[in-house]
Image (cartoon, helix red, strand yellow):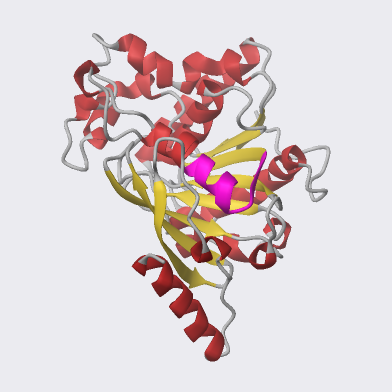
Amino acid sequence: MSRPFALGIAVAAGLALAGLSAPATPAAASAPAQASDGAYVSQETIAGPRLVDLTIQSPALGRAANVRLLTPDGWEQRARGDHWPVLYLLHGCCDSYVSWTRSTDVASIPELRDVLVVMPEAGAAGWYSDWWNGGRGGAPAWETFHLSEVRQIIERGYGAGPKRVVAGLSMGGFGAMSYAARNPGMFRAAASFSGVVHPLRDASYWLPFFGRTGLDPYALWGDPVAQRDVWQDHDPYYLVKRLRHTALFVATGDGTAGGPFDAPGRTDSLEALIHQENVDFVEQLREQGVSVTTDFYGPGSHSWPYWQRELHRSLPMLLDALETGRGVATHAFERP
């Protein structure tokens, strides 16, 4: 038995002796699940009730990265072949895989107690992409990490089933729409909260964000003029036809003052810019005959209280797509 997995079992035993609930980790007692490229779980950590953190050694990234699981009821007693529908929940720029459980009530939402919620690390500014790197490719390859390595590992060893939806905020909203469009059929539904859904529209604004981890910002997708095709291959605005069979939810504020969760007089230029990207994206979807549920809720900033609210508002659609029996057939947020 490897030392990390032995440590995980010891931690679980200690929590049990202390009278605290701790998820059992069947994978820790046998060979851990691996992805087809050799990615594997090197450590499991119990992060709280129903929360399990996985450390994955990733060839796609050339390093280890973390994934937080919010586990469903009965997961600790799962048998081989048991599986649950999956919600991939993606974080924003300059944050991490712990952000959703740190900053929202996602861990206490009753409707998610029969869903496996997967919250993967995506780099502070990884942008949910396999980086272009001057045409050479290679690390970091975040799309490969998430949609090949993580997906295979959780499906082979952690109870993830074939029914999947994806949602995210800001950079993660980009990830949700880009992943769904670039991989038709992988996700039944996608939701974006203040998402960067048309980065090429504001390329000069976003380039500095790409370099926030000290990497060359042009290494992500290249130059927006010389490598326009690479940008378009990732930009959801140019991929709307591929979303035709995916249930969609798109929400933003407009950055103006008066939002219910903001201080009086607060405005937000970032949310205003992102709002216009979302307006253009939704117009393009509808021009192409692609259905979308929107919540363009007016005044509001680029901040967590709005994203928590929009997660709740999008849940009926997401759960409908997962066929959990907790969704509803119609959705109330069709604002212009």
Identify whether 63 is placed above or below 73: above
> Relative to 304, is 136 on the left or the right?
left
Q: Position of residue 267 (x, y in %)?
A: 39, 45
* Most frequent secondary structure within the magenta stretch: helix
Residue situated in front as seen by the camera: 303 or 290: 290
Q: Is residue 134 magenta?
A: no
* Magenta extent: 150-162
Q: Residue at x 22, y 20 (%)?
A: 136
Q: Position of residue 164 (x, y in %)?
A: 64, 39
Where, by quadrant of the figure, is residue 76 drawn? Answer: bottom right
Where, by quadrant of the figure, is residue 62 drawn? Answer: top left
Identify whether 141 is placed above or below 91: above
> Relative to 197, is 141 on the left or the right?
left
Q: Where does the N terminus fall, quadrant-wise?
A: bottom left
Q: Residue at x 32, y 39 (%)?
A: 59
> Relative to 86, is 192 on the left or the right?
left
Identify whether 119 is placed above or below 184: below
> Relative to 184, is 233 on the left or the right?
left
